[in-house]
Amino acid sequence: MLAPIVLFAYARPDHVRRTVESLSCNPGASDHELIVFSDAARTPDKQSAVDQVRGYLESIKGFRSVTIYHRPHNFGLAKSVISGVTQVLVEHERVIVVEDDLLTSPHFLAYMNDALDRFADDERVISIHGYVYPVQRTLPEAFFLPGADCWGWATWRRGWGIFSADGQALLDELKRRDLLKEFDFNGTYGYSKMLEGQIKGLNNSWAVRWYASAFLAGKLTLYPGRSLVHNIGNDGSGTHCGDGSSLNAILSATTINLSALEVVPSAPGQAAFESFFRKSQGTLVGRLGRRIRRLFSG
């Protein structure tokens, strides 16, 4: 069973074109449904760019079908993602999610569909992720970590059913169970502060709530040992983006082998992420911290 690809687009016509072209270069792309949610302009100065995006979307070919939902007013990324994924999963059992600034490896769709099939009935696994940080340590071929993630991902109806949009309830439960340090990758990155910011209205991150929902449920997400996603939005063009070169990943030129994969949290994967986050401390904390916050913003 092939999952539909759900694409969230806003006001960057060149980025969305490159995103779609990279997806279409995946073998088997023509067998997939593409469902696009196109957000409306938030301010008048964005209208021309939104019109260009919508014009391009009407020209997309190379997929089994293309369905476009034009938002009648501006939802913003968080509301658009939450409502869009929920809508698609009413009719489909699984979904692959990308935003309009993600280049994917030609092996992205094969990895996603293989993993979605392999772990469809494994309640321990909540999602599949395509991006991995450019860590300096050697990673396993593929590995699991607690929680969920947000740059090129996939899930099932059963997985998304765990999502809670109530940031305050999520934070209260993390505190009640004394899990804040673990949630923050052993204190190496302040995801709990990001969740507090969402509650206070300082950010509108859907992703930190997705992570917290999965983490509290004791669920795991699968990561590739080599990134299958590269974000091209960290060029100052996006609402939540800036210079994100520290998050740039080289797209894998080879497939990810999922055979003999044990469904347990990966100690090497955890250590590599913590090391990556730890390097953001000191003089780099402001710059790299902002980039990671943008990764989880919405």
Image: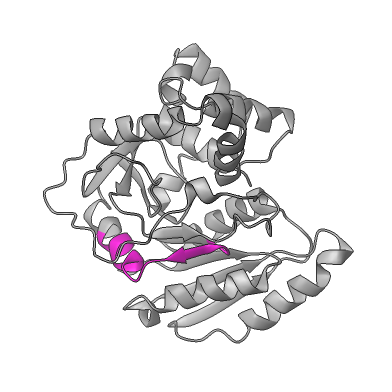
Q: Is residue 212 within the magenta segment?
A: no
Residue 87 on image: x %, y %:
56, 59
Residue 216 on image: x %, y %:
43, 27
Task: Report the side of 253 relative to 191 (left or right).
Answer: left
Residue in view at x 37 percent, y 67 percent: 105
User: Residue 127 or 245: which is nearer the viewer?
Assistant: 245
Q: Quadrant of the N terminus?
A: bottom left
Task: Say if residue 170 shows up in the picture.
Answer: no
Residue in view at x 44 percent, y 82 percent: 63
The vertical placement of 76 against 232, above or below, is above
Residue most extreme to the right: 44
Task: Say if residue 198 shows up in the picture.
Answer: yes
User: Residue 172 or 211: which is nearer the viewer?
Assistant: 211
Residue in view at x 46 percent, y 59 percent: 230
Q: Is residue 108 within the magenta segment?
A: yes
Residue in view at x 45 percent, y 73 percent: 22
* Quadrant position of residue 106: bottom left
Residue 112 on image: x %, y %:
33, 60
Q: Which residues are magenta?
A: 99-114
* Quadrant position of residue 208: top right
